[in-house]
Structure formats: C-alpha cells, structure tokens
Image (cartoon, rainbow, N blue to C red):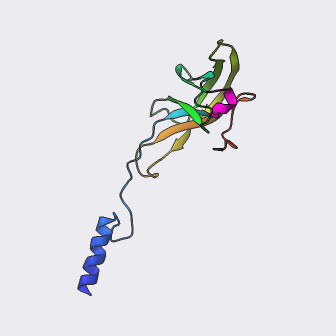
Amino acid sequence: MRRILLTLATAAALTGCSAFGQDASCTQADMDSAVAVMWRPADFGGTDAAVIRVCVEDRCEEQKSGDADNPIAGVSVRLPDDIGAVTVPVRLKVTAARDDRVVVDDSRRARLTEQHPNGTSCSPVAWTAAFRADPAKGLTSLEGLSLR
C-alpha cells in the first residue's frame, strides 16, 4: 500500500497536480495585444496582386495579399499590452500592386476583448479584436471565413 501511495504521489508531482487536485501551474503561451485582419488571398486576385494596409489609431502594418493557393493570410497591428477594454478605430486600405488603384477603403471601430492564453489566473493578459478583409464588404466579421 505504501508503495502505491508513493507511486501516485510521484506521478502527481511529475504531471503538475497537487495532492489536493488543484493545478497551480501555468502554460507558457505568449500573446500580444493586437488587432488582426485576415483574408483569403484568392479574393484579391493572383499571388501578391494587392497590398493590404491596416491601421489602428496611429500604428500601421501592411503586407502583400499572399499566395493565391494559400487558404488564409493576415496581418496584425500590435498594441500596448496594457491598453485595456477600449474601442479603437481600425482602417483597411487595399491597393492593387500593379497600378496602386484602391480596391478597398473601409474603417470600423473595434471593442478590444480580454484574452488569457494560459488561463484566467495566469499571465499574460492580451487585448484583441479580429476582422476579415472582404473585397466587396471591407472589414467584416471573421464568421464564415473558411480554410477551404
């Protein structure tokens, strides 16, 4: 009996469980506060046929539309980690790579939501929002964005 209890205690210690059934360990996943915009490269023509520029307040990031054979591409605009649950302006501008013609010019306001990638009692805390870049509708919900 003593050997069984010792074996169980050792197994519990190695798996990060306490004797009281509480898991006090946190994973080490990292996450930044950011607004992400995703799109299907095929929606914007051939490979790298467009340049997608996303601005949140005064911070901007841009990227070519990507390989038309890939199902999803995206860009994120990093925000201060302590930004909190605020509403921020988001602007999307898509231009044709060949002739700099504006394909999409849209803006929305995004309410940042709190994220805990390692659980609510563990750090980090990140504030995020996400959109889809649609060639006809501009910034839309990610709902319905398929990987196919």
Q: Position of residue 40 (x, y in %)?
A: 64, 34
The quarter of the picture where the N terminus appears is bottom left
Asked where in the image residue 14 lies, by quadrant, the reply is bottom left
Toward the viewer: 122 or 73?
73
Asked where in the image residue 70 lies, by quadrant, the reply is top right
Toward the viewer: 67 or 120?
67
Let me know if residue 41 is in the magenta part.
yes
Look at 62% across and 39% down and name the residue there: 71
Q: Is residue 36 left or right of residue 126?
A: right
Range of magenta residues: 39-46
User: Quick one: which residue is furthest to the bottom in this view?
Assistant: 1
Q: Position of residue 125 (x, y in %)?
A: 45, 42
Look at 35% across and 57% down and name the residue there: 25
Look at 56% across and 22% down and name the residue there: 57
Give the number of callouts: 0
The quarter of the picture where the C terminus appears is top right
- In this rendering, the answer to whether 26 lies above or below 56 is below
User: Quick one: which residue is furthest to the right in this view?
Assistant: 136
Q: Visible in this render: residue 112?
A: no
Let me know if residue 100 is in the magenta part.
no
Look at 28% across and 81% down and name the residue there: 5
Q: Visible in this render: residue 107?
A: yes
- In this rendering, the answer to whether 107 lies above or below 30 is above
- In this rendering, the answer to whether 95 lies above or below 2 is above
